[in-house]
Image (spheres, rainbow, N blue to C red):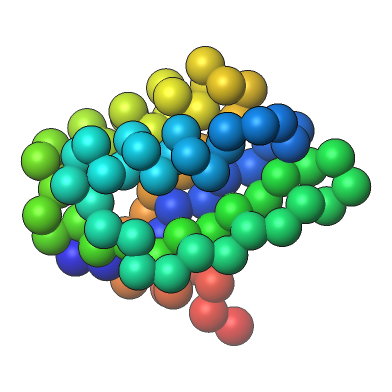
């Protein structure tokens, strides 16, 4: 299954490395990634493949959220189909 991971927060060293490492540890493959800095805010959107994920989708979501909170970031993951339905005009 494909999913969208979003990361938002104040920019600091190691954001991309920590998020990518966490995904890799859980068997999640990054298919595409886009990131930018908006003034002092870091934003990143990733398209990932969770088909080989070692944990349930809910557990992955909780892990990302907790990891983000520890780093003062908002990290969320949504199934691609739900993300698309929410952003369809």
Quarter of the figure that contains the C terminus: bottom right
28 to 34, vertically: above or below: above
- In the depicted view, which residue is nearer to us: 63 or 22? 22
Residue 18, given in percent of the width and then of the height, sits at: 46, 34
16 to 82, vertically: above or below: above
Determine the residue located farthest toward the bottom in the rendered image.
89
Residue 10, given in percent of the width and then of the height, sits at: 75, 33
Residue 37, given in percent of the width and then of the height, sits at: 77, 52
Q: Can you tell which quarter of the image residue 7 is in?
A: top right
Residue 35, given in percent of the width and then of the height, sits at: 63, 58
Describe residue 1's horizontal placement relative to residue 88 as left or right: left
Q: Residue at position x 44%, y 24% from top?
A: 67
Quarter of the figure that contains the N terminus: bottom left
Describe residue 68's horizontal placement relative to residue 24 as left or right: right
Q: Residue at position x 43%, y 69% from top?
A: 32
- In the depicted view, which residue is nearer to us: 57 or 11? 11
- In the depicted view, which residue is nearer to us: 16 or 3? 16
């Amino acid at each position: 299954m494909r999913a969208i991971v979003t990361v938002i927060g104040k920019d600091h060293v190691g954001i991309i490395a920590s998020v990518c490492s966490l995904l890799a540890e859980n068997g999640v493959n990054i298919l595409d990634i886009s990131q930018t800095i908006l003034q002092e805010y870091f934003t990143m959107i990733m398209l990932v493949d969770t088909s080989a994920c070692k944990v349930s989708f809910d557990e992955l979501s909780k892990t990302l959220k907790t990891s983000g909170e520890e780093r003062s970031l908002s990290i969320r993951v949504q199934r691609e189909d739900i993300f698309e339905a929410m952003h369809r005009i």
